[in-house]
Image: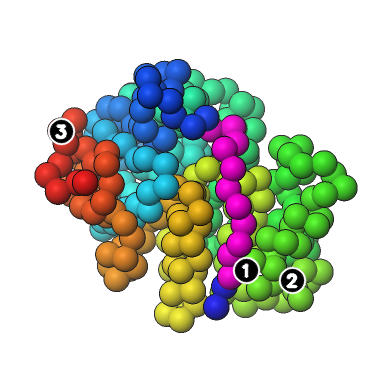
Amino acid sequence: MFKFRAKTKSNGLAVVEADGYRHGNTHLIDLRGVSKSYATAAGDFTALRQIDLLVDRGEFVAVVGKSGSGKSTLINMITGIDRPTAGQVLIGDTAVHTLSEGQMAVWRGKHVGVIFQFFQLLPTLTIIENVMLPMDFCNTYPARERASRAMALLDEVEMTEHADKLPSAASGGQQQRVAIARALANDPAIIVADEPTGNLDSKTADAVFQLFQRLVDEGKTIVMVTHDDELAHRAGRTVTIADGLIVGDTGQGNGGMVNGEQLMGNG
């Protein structure tokens, strides 16, 4: 079983005041009329259609839908990995859609922890070096403290004894634990996970989910794409996407919106 003791703090994404963030948003994540189209050989393909989505600090949101529904495109908007064709992406005090490529990389490194289905660990770096990489890239924490912080994060996911190994020497479940530790390296306010349990056995997947829940309890905001209906139902809120539209939003979230209208049943 993973253990988690890390303390969250108010870092670069400002805590919302009564009058909202500087861009007028009062939610940590605020997507306004976001559309995304891609040019293909068969013509333009629209992955997202006028999406409105509000997520508050400390929410655990599962995003579900069939393959090709727009789930991954949606979280790519939140992380800045991709840009909207139309609409606004406001994350705390940052209008993400206005950032340059260089600004985007630095912003994402400091404020969003991304966890991928296939881990995306650098194969030529040791496990501890993979966890240190976001700190090195963004120049967060004094250089002399980065190794000890990385070891503390590996301890949280029970991977300290593997710190000096290459990722290839670790199992899939172990590599996912390292990926989670790496995502936490810069103490981001938001964790975005794309099918984080897709390649894990059920026991390890449950342990990962419990770690996510503890992160939320400590104040993190998690947006998780998953095909696992059981895991989705255990999250605080479930957003369902079909054909590039949000067609369902259930749970305890305060900001559920579909086509600009507040959904019934959101607390």
Q: Which residue is mark 2?
A: 160
Kind of residue at badge 3: Glu
Q: Which residue is mark 1?
A: 157
Q: 10 Å neighbourhood of mark 1: few (<14), some, or many (≥20)? A: many
Whole-angstrom CA distance, mark 2 to mark 1, is: 8 Å
Kind of residue at badge 1: Val
Residue at 76 percent across and 76 percent down: it is 161
In the rendered image, which quarter contains the N terminus? Answer: bottom right
Element type at mark 3: strand
Q: Position of residue 93 (x, y in %)?
A: 49, 25
Q: Position of residue 182 (x, y in %)?
A: 65, 55
Element type at mark 1: loop
Q: Position of residue 220 (x, y in %)?
A: 49, 49
Say whether disc 3 or disc 2 marks the residue closer to the N-terminus.
2
Task: State left or right for residue 35 relative to residue 264.
Answer: right
Residue at 62 percent across and 57 percent down: it is 6
Q: Which residue is mark 3?
A: 261
Residue at 53 percent across and 43 percent down: it is 189
Q: How is the image coloured?
A: rainbow
Q: Is residue 261 above or below residue 224?
A: above
Q: Which residues are magenta?
A: 3-13
Residue 65, picture quadrant: bottom left
